[in-house]
Image: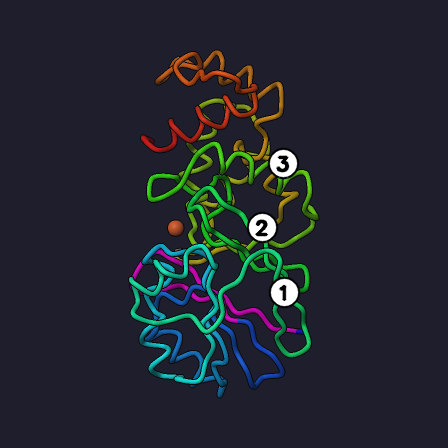
Amino acid sequence: MLDIITLASKKTDNFFYMLVHNNTQAILIDPIDATLAREELEQRGLELVAIYNTHWHPDHVGGNAELREYAPSCDVVVPEDEAARIEDLTGVKATRTITSKDTLDFGGSTIKVHALPGHTMGHIAYEVEGHLFLGDVIFAGGVGHCKLGGDVDTLHNTIRHIVEDLDGDLIVHCGHNYVQKNVQFALQFEPDHAGLQTQLERAKQAEPRTIRATTIKEERSYNPFLRTDEATLIEALKSYQGGSPWQSYDKDGIDDSQHAFLMLRGLRDHY
Ligand SMILES: [Fe+2]
């Protein structure tokens, strides 16, 4: 059984994650803040055995070089489709490139790889022992943007796949905490939604620079980007008058769920 430690970067607004086996070995997922990562490793007396990246964005891979220098024998595991880009950005060549066909092993625990494209086109997530580390795919109350190498329709398909095919009880660990702004955005369309109201209260009371893990099931209950198949949300979006209206997101051959997703992503980009 692995221990999971959440780390709040002091350099950026990212959160990143440390998996610990047997109080001796550690893996870091998207360790942007190498200084903080080293402090944690040293304080806990842990050997860094691998760095895992979810996608190429600099605020996820930016700690690779310094940590590899610190632990020269550690593995660097990156999504195959983004390996070249990550190497260009960091100067560090991956020791292993992976796709959703691969599994990894850490201290006897199997780590499953999911392809979740859309925020970036090669974005992957790591699943282990009921936990899903998914970078910038889903955030509490929202999803990642598609402005830096992503595609909104692809992200919609990925979100439908997560909702329909993955275990709702998976505990979701993401790269940023935008819950308050996400929920305030969503309340524009559904001001009476009890789940959104609860999340807003909870977000206001949370300590600064902390993040609460969520689950797919919990996000499915209030996060509008996971609910674009719900008639009530579609109706709310159709009647929304506060910005670019429903009709302006029309495209040939799209269904209401895709249409709603495009509108939500478009409006959230400018919120
Ligand atoms: Fe990102």
Crowding near the residue tagged with mark 3, few <14, some 14–19, many ≥20 C-alpha atoms within 10 Å: some
The one of 6 and 24 positioned closer to us in this rendering? 24
Ligand 1 within 8 Å of the CB at mark 1: no
Give the Cα separation between the discs numbered 3 and 1. 30 Å
The one of 118 and 243 positioned closer to us in this rendering? 118
Residue 154 at x, y percent in the picture: 49, 36
Mark closer to the observer (2, 1) = 1
Residue 2 at x, y percent in the picture: 63, 73
User: Mark 2 or mark 1: which comes first in sequence?
Assistant: 1
Among the 4 quarters of the image, the one containing residue 53 = bottom left
Which residue is labeled 3 in the image? 221
> Is residue 91 found left or right of 158 in the rendered image?
left
> Is residue 186 found left or right of 2 in the rendered image?
left
Q: Is residue 241 above or below residue 142?
A: above
The residue type indicated by label 3 comes to Ser
Which residue is labeled 2 in the image? 214
The residue type indicated by label 1 comes to Thr
What's drawn in magenta, residue-wise? 2-18
User: Mark 3 or mark 1: which comes first in sequence?
Assistant: 1
Q: Residue at x 54, y 55 (%)?
A: 125
Residue at disc 3, secondary structure: helix
Give the Cα separation between the discs numbered 2 and 1. 24 Å
Residue at disc 1, secondary structure: strand
Q: Residue at x 45, y 27 (%)?
A: 264
* 4 within the magenta span: yes
Which residue is labeled 1 in the image? 103
